Image: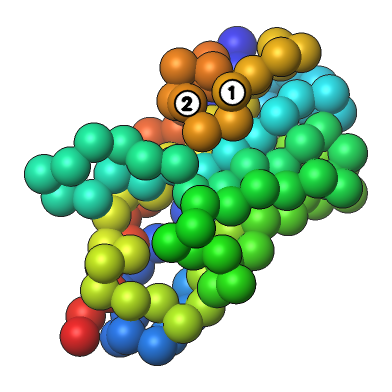
């Protein structure tokens, strides 16, 4: 049974940084795609960042490009999201997601089969 557990969320002032972690278990994740999505208050879930199985290909939403960095641990079962220069509009519940499909649409949440419970990130102005 695949399980994803996020951690690292919290309250931070604008301009600050947070590092989110997502620990995956229940299966070998060496060949999985992983991503972060977020859901702002009152809005739909949106794509944030993606990383392929080897960690050498990443893709970001325009709104976070240059400020956020996604990475994977050496064992490939952990994914991180380093968030710098945070803005109030980054406030959201952040979700980790993974899939073992070979073909996906990166920005589409329906491409990902397994999700964590989410971690709250609040950025104050």
In the image, farthest residue toward the left: 42
Residue 97, picture quadrant: top right
Residue 87, picture quadrant: bottom left
Whether residue 120 is situated above or below residue 16 in the rendered picture: above
Left or right side of 17 for 51 = right
Q: How many marks?
A: 2
Residue 108 image label: 2
Q: Quadrant of the N terminus?
A: top right
Residue toward you, 115 or 67: 67
- Name the residue at 66% across, 56% down: 70
Residue toward you, 78 or 103: 103
Whether residue 67 is situated above or below residue 26 in the rendered picture: below
Residue 83 image label: none
Image x and y of residue 42, in percent: 11, 44
Is residue 23 visible to us here? no
Left or right side of 107 for 53 = right
Are discs 1 and 2 less than 8 Å apart at CB?
yes
**Circle 2 residues within 10 Å: few <14, some 14–19, many ≥20:** few
Image x and y of residue 90, in percent: 33, 64
Report, in whole angstroms, how far the alpha carbon at label 1 lies from the one at label 2. 6 Å
In the image, farthest residue toward the front: 62
Q: Name the image colouring.
A: rainbow
Image x and y of residue 29, in percent: 78, 26
Q: Quadrant of the C terminus?
A: bottom left
**Circle 1 residues within 10 Å: few <14, some 14–19, many ≥20:** few
Is residue 95 visible to us here? yes
- Name the residue at 54% across, 20% down: 112
- Name the residue at 71% across, 29% down: 33
Image x and y of residue 15, in percent: 40, 88
Residue 105 image label: 1
- Name the residue at 46% across, 33% down: 116
């Amino acid at each position: 049974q695949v399980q994803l557990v996020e951690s690292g969320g919290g309250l931070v002032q604008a301009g600050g940084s947070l590092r989110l972690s997502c620990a995956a278990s229940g299966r070998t994740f060496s060949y999985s795609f992983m991503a972060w999505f977020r859901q702002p208050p009152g809005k739909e879930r949106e794509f944030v960042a993606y990383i392929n199985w080897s960690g050498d290909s990443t893709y970001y939403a325009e709104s976070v490009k240059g400020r956020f960095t996604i990475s994977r641990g050496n064992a490939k079962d952990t994914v991180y999201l380093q968030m710098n220069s945070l803005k109030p509009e980054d406030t959201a519940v952040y979700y980790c997601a993974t899939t073992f499909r070979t073909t996906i649409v990166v920005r589409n949440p329906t491409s990902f089969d397994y999700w964590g419970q989410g971690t709250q990130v609040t950025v104050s102005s």
